[in-house]
Amino acid sequence: MSGSALILGGNGRFGRNCTLAFKAAGWQVRQFDRQSDDLMQAVQGVDVIVAAWNPAYPDWATQVLQQHTQVIEAAKTVDATVIVPGNVYVYGPENEKVWRNTTPHLAQNPLGRIRIDMEAVYRNSDVRTILLRAGDFIDTQDSGNWFDMILTSKLSKGVFRYPGRVDIPHAWAFLPDLTRAAVALADRRDSLNRFEDVAFPGYTMSGQDMAHALSDVCGVDLRLKQVNWLPFRLMSPVWKMASCLLEMRYLWNTPHSLARDRFVELLPDFQETPVTVALRRAVAGKVQKSGLSITDTSTQTSR
């Protein structure tokens, strides 16, 4: 099953990769232009709405619920399925360590509560919703996420930076895989629950695991260096984003992974990209600029 997809936030990380994935699968894809388009008109004739709008952290309190309420109202007019990129913020640090669709939402911090409230709006709306939940993103180009802005920003100097405990599991998602999964679930939309909360298992890696994998990819023994959080604390009174990053710091010190049971039940034949291949694609630009050489890992298997 295919159809027509409207991408909200097509210039962002998830939206850009979703655009590529839906087009590759033969869907008709429309991009929403906030400057000139009207959402109620743009959804006409659309089967799937990808709700990839994502304001900056400091604007979440004023914009997130408002934006998603608009998406829900628009989806109702055409009975469209909404795909929402979910995250792990809802769970909180005092929870079980393998997170799935039945894991309670225990987050008490402001950003976590906003996401809990946003998901509840969809859950209670009766709009057909696919909430595809993932860990931190690994992208194929620098797009302003933790992986490219912090962790791999010093690869040219032989350094891999990590913002938390390096010995605990952390959930990661390769965006081309995540958005292929979004398309595969969209193809099955008529057979899913009205509200479908699906955890994308992705890769579970500690900081040490990723440092070793990137060392293999880059052909150099990377030094693992802890991120210094002091500048974030010093800047937080005048830089709102720093306060938000500090608020979410606990995720780097909380062991967690995403369960694969529901995902495998729905998409048993899904083939993820081997982790070393994903990392090679993710850091290719940085490595080329630095003069390092990328090791061919295409024959290696995923973890």
Image (tube, grey):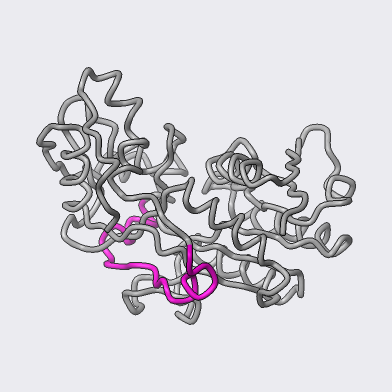
Q: Which x, y percent locates residue 46?
A: 82, 52
The stretch in magenta equals 246-269
**Is 116 or 159 nearer to us in this picture?**
159
Q: Is residue 77 left or right of residue 87?
A: right
- How many numbered markers are drawn? 0
- With respect to residue 208, does 155 lie above or below? above
Q: Which x, y percent locates residue 220?
A: 12, 32
Can residue 55 be spotted in the picture?
A: no
Q: Is residue 56 left or right of residue 302?
A: right
Can residue 48 be spotted in the picture?
A: yes
**Is 124 or 98 nearer to us in this picture?**
98
Residue 286 placement: quadrant? top left
Quadrant where the N terminus sits is bottom right
Q: Is residue 37 left or right of residue 66?
A: right
For the point 28% across and 66% down, the residue is: 254
For the point 79% across and 56% down, the residue is: 47
For the point 53% across and 41% down, the residue is: 13
Residue 252 placement: quadrant? bottom left
**Is 159 or 214 nearer to us in this picture?**
214
Q: Which x, y percent locates residue 19?
A: 63, 41
Within the magenta stretch, is there residue 75?
no
Quadrant where the C terminus sits is bottom left
